[in-house]
Amino acid sequence: MTTTTPGGSLTLAEDLVISRMGYGAMQLAGPGVFGPPKDRDQALAVLREAIALGITHIDTSDYYGPFVVNELIKEALHPYPGALHIVTKVGARRDETGAWIPSLEPAALKTQVHDNLQHLGLEALDVVNLRLGSVEGTSEESIAEQFGALADLREQGLIRHLGLSGVSLTQLTEAQAIAPVVTVQNLYNLANRADDALVAHCAAQNIAFASFFPLGGFSPLQSQTLTDVATRLEASPQQVALAWLLQRSATTVLIPGTSSLSHLRENVSAADLVLPPDAVAELDTIAQ
């Protein structure tokens, strides 16, 4: 087992030190993040390999599957290594067709926290992100009631730290007046730079900024500029896109997802790729 931490570590609190290169477990579920995996043994192997590669930061949610991914994590890794931190999300549910349904009532959020605890086999969750926006964007609506419900569970000891997903700067500021925020998880990548100011804000406050869809998500990154830079650096375009995010600020963290052992290893190796200034400048033109 490796003794290094891919991408280095980020200290968010005395009891919360995570690898900047994390692992997003969403793709371990079946097609559409719904139902069981196509290859259960492979899914378990990917989780175990992530730990073997030095990853100490796994992103998940009970609505992946639903329940399937958290149960896989428990089966593969419980009892959990002391250095491992599992970040989960609440704020949505799935219907019988697999559709994503917002579920933000305070009582529902508390039920979701207890469900995550049960399916992960934990007495307290390391980090819980409140899922607000979507891939379409964020809003300025008040989140005091919803975030306050999670802050209550933090006071009860069921949650150690709180975060936000799909959030605007206005909502982040409102939440911080209620309880500390250690993570923000928003859509952000080479081609989607709307949150540049929020990335800088999080860095200034030592808040981890986790990019979901770091490789484009529903619209995978396709750019001749990216391809050209990758060819010059003898790396894959995916590795370059991940390395760019790691270099974007001191508190960006990555949670790329995969159900493939080879892709997992390729993603982790991106943490060792250092982009020279001219490559960064060239890549920065993609969003323009």
Image (cartoon, grey):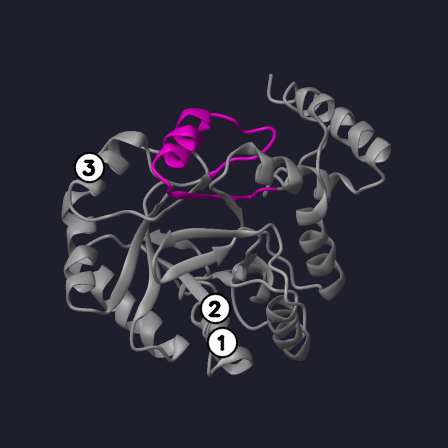
Instruction: Give the amino acid type for the residue marked by disc 2 in the picture.
Output: Leu
Query: Image height check: is 32 above or below 275?
Result: below
Residue occupied by mark 2 = 84
Label 1 Cα crowd, 10 Å radius (few <14 / some 14-19 / many 20+): few
SS assignment at label 2: loop
* Residue lying at 82% horizontally and 28% vertically, measured from the top left: 228
Residue visible at 57% across and 35% down?
A: 189
Q: CA distance from mark 3 to mark 1?
A: 34 Å
The percent position of residue 44, horizontal first and vertical second, equals 61, 76
Q: Is residue 213 magenta?
A: yes
From which residue to which does the magenta span run? 187-214
Looking at the image, residue 126 sits to the left or right of residue 2; the answer is left
> Residue 35 in the image: x percent, y percent?
53, 70
Q: Which label sits on residue 174?
A: 3
Q: Position of residue 169 (x, y in %)?
A: 31, 31
Judging by the rendered image, the residue that carries numbered circle 1 is 81
Task: Point out which mark residue 52 bears.
Answer: none
The amino acid beneath tag 3 is: Glu
